[in-house]
């Protein structure tokens, strides 16, 4: 079982004897964020205005999955507009979309 929101799980699921090992993967630090961006933008055609350092330096709680989703969405935004290169504006819009979905979270009362 894997989750980013252990607090949303029913305590009966995580009591001793049910799940024997819990491995926490903390949010990536700046160096790791930089590497994740490099992996997911490595094959993308980036415009000259793209500066991933702007996103690395922010204090937003971006997980590795969030960064991947952001890169994918930025690429799709460029494709939808039939552009060959992904711009900084594409990344900004993609981040906004990823953060919005992240804030939406689990519908209230789902695990009650």
Image: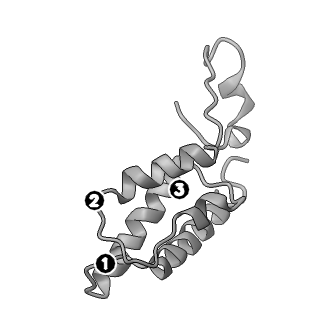
Q: Compare residues 32 and 95 and report the one nearer the observer.
A: 32
Q: Secondary structure at mark 2?
A: loop
How many marks on residues? 3
Mark 3 and mark 1 in contact? Answer it, CB < 8 Å. Answer: no
The residue where tag 3 is placed is 66
Residue depicted at x 53% and y 56%: 66
Residue beneath the point at 38% across and 64% down: 72
Is 107 located above or below residue 111 in the figure? below
Q: Is mark 1 in CB contact (under 8 Å) with mark 2?
A: no
| Mark 3 or mark 1, earlier in chain | 3
Q: Could you tell me residue 100's position as x and y percent?
A: 61, 70
For mark 2, what is the residue?
A: 43
Q: Earlier in the sequence, mark 2 or mark 3?
A: 2
Decide if residue 80 is on the left or right side of residue 33.
Answer: left
> How would you rate the neighbour count of disc 1 (Cα within 10 Å): few for under 14, some for 14-19, many for 20 or more?
some
User: On screen, 12 above or below 83?
Assistant: above
How many other residues sit within 10 Å of disc 2, few (<14), some (14-19) or many (≥20)? few
Find residue 10 and report its image quarter: top right
Q: Residue visible at 45% across and 60% down?
A: 69
Q: Secondary structure at mark 3?
A: helix
Which residue is most to the bottom? 81
**Numbered label attached to residue 85:** 1
């Amino acid at each position: 079982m894997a989750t980013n929101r252990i607090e949303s799980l029913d305590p009966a699921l995580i009591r001793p004897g049910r799940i024997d090992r819990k491995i926490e993967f903390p949010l990536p630090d700046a160096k790791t964020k930089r590497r994740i961006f490099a992996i997911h933008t490595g094959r993308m055609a980036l415009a000259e205005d793209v500066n991933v350092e702007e996103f690395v330096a922010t204090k937003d709680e971006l997980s590795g999955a969030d960064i991947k989703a952001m890169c994918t969405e930025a690429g799709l935004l460029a494709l939808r507009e039939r552009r060959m290169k992904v711009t900084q504006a594409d990344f900004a819009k993609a981040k906004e979309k990823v953060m919005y979905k992240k804030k939406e979270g689990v519908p209230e009362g789902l695990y009650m």
